[in-house]
Amino acid sequence: MSDDIQLEDGRTWSGSSSLVSWICRLTACELTGAFGRWLNDVKDRPNGLCSFDLRGLSNDDCDVFYSATARALERARQSGDYPDAASYFERWEVLLRMRESIRRGEPPNTLTHYAIVVPFDGKPIDFNDIWFCPECSTCLNQKKSCDACGFRLFSNDEGPDAWNDHG
Ligand SMILES: [Zn+2]
């Protein structure tokens, strides 16, 4: 199984679902607030359902994503914790090279994993779209509280930004 990330100009980076999940997990560690929680949730989604489209992010959040994922890649490489991950690192690096290609104004087919440009469905990414309880990993079935442990995704006066997985 593989999952895809569509970039700003509609080109696609594609990787094995386990790689995408790993990238989401490590990148989420570089983020706080709703964005980090959402990305951390994406990593647990079933193979083939971890895809996302960066065109659904604001320009600012898109920048935040790239800098976080670049930091995460660098940190993972430096850590020495993943001695067998050379091919993963290489593939991950391509995502950042695609970004640089976009910045240079090159057309999507300069560097892409798909020959076609995928049309944007127009849907913004909703950071409150959380599938699994952050406490016990029970599937929330689109509810905002967990039937298994009682965890509430948001308390009354607490917006999604109050969440922090890393505190
Ligand atoms: Zn729970």
Image (cartoon, grey):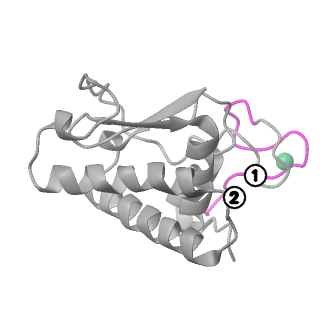
Instruction: Report the predominant secondary structure element of the magenta stretch.
Output: loop
Q: For the magenta stretch, what is the residue range? A: 140-158
Which label is found at residue 152?
1
Residue at x 25%, y 22% (from the top left corner): 116
Is disc 2 surrounded by few (<14), some (14 to 19) or many (20+) residues within 10 Å? few
Magenta stretch contains residue 153: yes
Farthest residue to the right: give it.
148
Considering the image in quadrants, where does the N terminus appear? top right
- The residue that disc 2 covers is 155
Residue at x 69%, y 42% (from the top left corner): 44
Q: Is residue 76 above or below residue 17?
A: below
The quadrant in which residue 165 appears is: bottom right
Give the residue type at disc 2: Ser
Tell me the SS state at disc 2. loop
- The answer to whether residue 17 is left or right of residue 150 is left
Give coordinates of residue 20: x percent, y percent: 56, 44
Query: Can you see residue 66?
Result: yes
Give coordinates of residue 4: x percent, y percent: 45, 34
- The answer to whether residue 85 is left or right of residue 126 is right
Is disc 1 surrounded by few (<14), some (14 to 19) or many (20+) residues within 10 Å? some
Tell me the SS state at disc 1. loop
Give coordinates of residue 55: x percent, y percent: 30, 41
Residue at x 65%, y 74% (from the top left corner): 80
Give the residue type at disc 1: Arg
The answer to the question of whether label 1 and label 2 lie on touching residues, with beta carbons closer than 8 A, is yes
Q: Is residue 136 above or below residue 158?
A: above
